[in-house]
Amino acid sequence: MIDKIEIIGLAAAVLTTTSFVPQVYKAWNQKATKDISLTMYLSFFMGVVLWFIYGIQIESLSIILANSVTGLLVFIVIILKLKYK
Amino acid sequence: MIDKIEIIGLAAAVLTTTSFVPQVYKAWNQKATKDISLTMYLSFFMGVVLWFIYGIQIESLSIILANSVTGLLVFIVIILKLKYK
């Protein structure tokens, strides 16, 4: 049975991870990324990679799940940012 | 002595937290937030609050530190987004 603490972690993971979906959708649809900071997304991506490693080290399902999906979405925003400048 | 795993966590925390600074700076300077998704930042903010609670529960300094500062920066982006639409 998953304990209460990991449920908070999973809920946090779902929220912070899925939060990038509307940004990907907006950038994809409007083909406009001028106001988005590339520096933010590049450093955020590097941080997410480290969080992923951290999650594996402390064996936290929430952190591992969150950061693999977030990493993918953030990577897409970076691609869209480079494409639409 | 802080162990190696928490150093990875702290490095991840620094990167993902400070990554919002260039976005706050860009939005503040250019007074333009059209391409930024409000939905993303609202759900990200809720997630950060949950990560903060999670960090307290598992007593992880990295997660507590990261999410209190990130929460503040994300809150500022939300204010700038509402101000400059």
Image (cartoon, coloured by chain):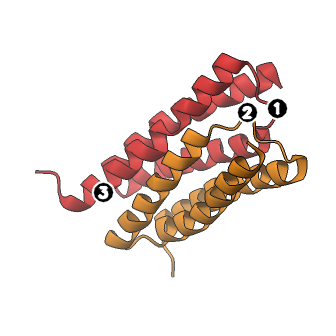
Chain colours: A red, B orange
Q: Is residue A26 above or below residue B81?
A: above
Of the pair A45 and A50, the residue shown nearer to us = A45
Of the pair A61 and B46, the residue shown nearer to us = B46
**Dot 1 falls on which chain?**
A
Q: Is residue A42 above or below residue B22?
A: above
Amino acid carrying mark 3 in the image: Ile
Percent from the top left, x then y, of residue B30?
Answer: 89, 46
Mark 2 on the same chain as mark 1 = no
Percent from the top left, x then y, of residue B42?
Answer: 53, 48
Percent from the top left, x then y, of residue A30?
Answer: 70, 19
Horizontal side of residue A80 vs B54, given as left or right: right
Q: CA distance from mark 1 to mark 3?
A: 35 Å
Residue ID at (32%, 48%): A10
Residue ID at (58%, 56%): B12
**Dot 2 falls on which chain?**
B
Please tell me the numbered disc located at residue A34: 1
Amino acid carrying mark 2 in the image: Asp
**Dot 3 falls on which chain?**
A
Comparing labels 1 and 3, the label whose residue is closer to the camera: 1
Circle 3 is placed at which residue position? A8
Percent from the top left, x then y, of residue A42?
Answer: 71, 41
Near mark 3 (Cα within 10 A), the count class, few <14, some 14-19 or many ≥20, is many
Q: Quadrant of residue B40?
A: top right
